[in-house]
Amino acid sequence: MTQNVLDAREIPHESRLETIFAKLKALTPGQDLELVAPHQPDQLLRKVLAEFPRRFDFSPVLKGPVTWRYVFRARTDAGPRTVSDYLAWDHDRLDAIMEHCTKLVGENRFEEARAHMGEFKEGLFRHIEIEEQILFKAFEDKTGMRDVGPTAVMRMEHKDIKEAVNDIVKACEDKRLDEFERGKATLLGVLVEHNMKEEQILYPGTDRMLDDGAREKLVETLLLG
Ligand SMILES: [Fe+2]
Ligand SMILES: [Fe+2]
């Protein structure tokens, strides 16, 4: 989670894009910037992809209804985009939010934990959505495997993951440390291995199946999803 926040609403409209680009350009590899916007910044995201090819990853932190927040990361690898690189970063990003929530709950700061769990849920559900709708589809189209094979297993695990996340959100709302810990244990019981299987098998497998152009295009579609 980043401390480096830029609120686009505070920048005059005529210099907004320029200011955002300047902030992005100032990031050193691995550094983050969180952008707050008054609407879904689709146009901006496309401009970032066009203006700075391969330089930044981004994922939504909050998608409305009043403010939209996106976190940008300057890529550490200047090479071509890969599914592995982007989605493993997104796993790490989400893990960090969960760790922060755990710390807050341990300090009895349930209100704050609740807000961050909201971000975790939104981020993880979106991650699952782009996997199922974009990545798994690409894998299944290439391999012809749908009802059997790795994506079928991943889809089933996604259901368990979502259920556990909803339990954790509720535990934060109810301010129940025991329920939080139980939900988190259930979640990690599935998620740790799930992410490992994706990072070791499914993501690199998909990367290998595609040529450079198709891979780049697929990752851009994931980014915008
Ligand atoms: Fe997944
Ligand atoms: Fe994943």
Image (tube, helix red, strand yellow):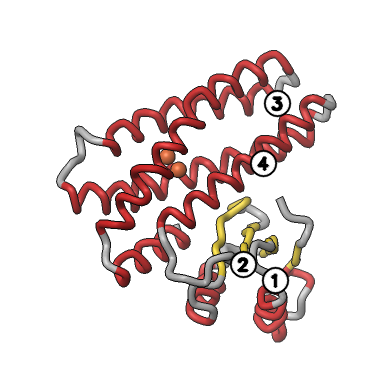
Name the one closer to the observer, 42 or 191. Answer: 191
Mark nearer the N terminus (4 vs 2): 2
Rounded to the nearest angstrom, the CA distance separating label 1 from label 4 is 21 Å
What amino acid type is highlighted by mark number 4? Ile
Tag 1–tag 4 contact (CB < 8 Å):
no
The residue under label 3 is 172
Mark nearer the N terminus (1 vs 3): 1
Q: Which quadrant of the structure image shows residue 222?
A: bottom left
The residue under label 1 is 27
The residue under label 2 is 74
Q: Nearer the viewer, mark 3 or mark 2?
A: 2
**For the point 54% across and 20% down, which residue is it?**
186
Rounded to the nearest angstrom, the CA distance separating label 1 from label 3 is 34 Å
> Ligand 2: which quarter?
top left
Q: Residue 30 location, x and y as percent? A: 65, 62
Which class describes the residues within 10 Å of circle 1: few (<14), some (14-19), or many (20+)? some
Rounded to the nearest angstrom, the CA distance separating label 4 from label 3 is 14 Å
Q: Residue 4 location, x and y as percent? A: 77, 61
